[in-house]
């Protein structure tokens, strides 16, 4: 749900602006949530949202983080 809200907010703010990209990366995929998000992004027609779900080596993870202008940590935790 929180990632869906993030995608909706991004779409509202930036639409399909190819100068702006939303990268969503996870190492977990519970209940096919990754595939659900892929379908959700596709249904919105967003070509500037990239979803990845894989384990990264520390250097790859550091490079990914370094590539961001803004970092959002989405959590489903309570409290």
Image: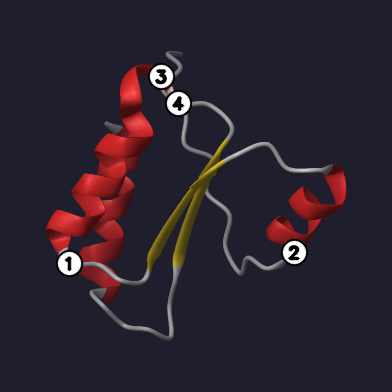
| Badge nearest the viewer, 1 or 2 | 1
Q: Residue 45: which numbered mark, if any? A: 1
Residue drawn at point x = 68 percent, y = 68 percent: 67
Residue with the most extreme left position: 43
55 shown above or below 6: above
How many residues crowd mark 2 within 10 Å: few (<14), some (14–19), many (20+)?
A: few
Residue 55 vs residue 70, the one in the foreground: 55
**Res 9 quadrant in image:** bottom left
Mark toward the start of the polypeptide (2 vs 4): 4
How many residues crowd mark 1 within 10 Å: few (<14), some (14–19), many (20+)?
A: few
Mark toward the start of the polypeptide (4 vs 1): 4
| Quadrant of the rendering where the N terminus is positioned | top left
Q: Residue 66: which numbered mark, if any? A: 2
Q: Residue 12: which numbered mark, if any? A: none
Q: Residue 29: which numbered mark, if any? A: 4
Mark toward the start of the polypeptide (3 vs 1): 3
The secondary element bearing badge 2 is classed as helix
Do callouts 3 and 2 mark residues in contact (Cβ within 8 Å)?
no
Q: Residue 30: which numbered mark, if any? A: 3
Q: CA distance from mark 3 to mark 4?
A: 4 Å
| Badge nearest the viewer, 2 or 4 | 4
Do callouts 3 and 4 mark residues in contact (Cβ within 8 Å)?
yes
Q: CA distance from mark 3 to mark 2?
A: 27 Å
The secondary element bearing badge 1 is classed as loop
Residue drawn at point x = 77 percent, y = 61 percent: 63
* Total residue callouts: 4
């Amino acid at each position: 749900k929180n990632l869906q809200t993030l995608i909706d907010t991004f779409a509202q703010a930036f639409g399909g602006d190819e100068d702006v990209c939303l990268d969503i990366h996870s190492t977990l995929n519970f209940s096919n949530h990754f595939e659900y998000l892929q379908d959700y992004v596709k249904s919105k027609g967003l070509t500037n949202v990239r979803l990845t779900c894989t384990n990264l080596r520390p250097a790859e993870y550091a490079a990914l983080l370094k590539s961001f202008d803004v970092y959002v940590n989405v959590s489903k935790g309570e409290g």
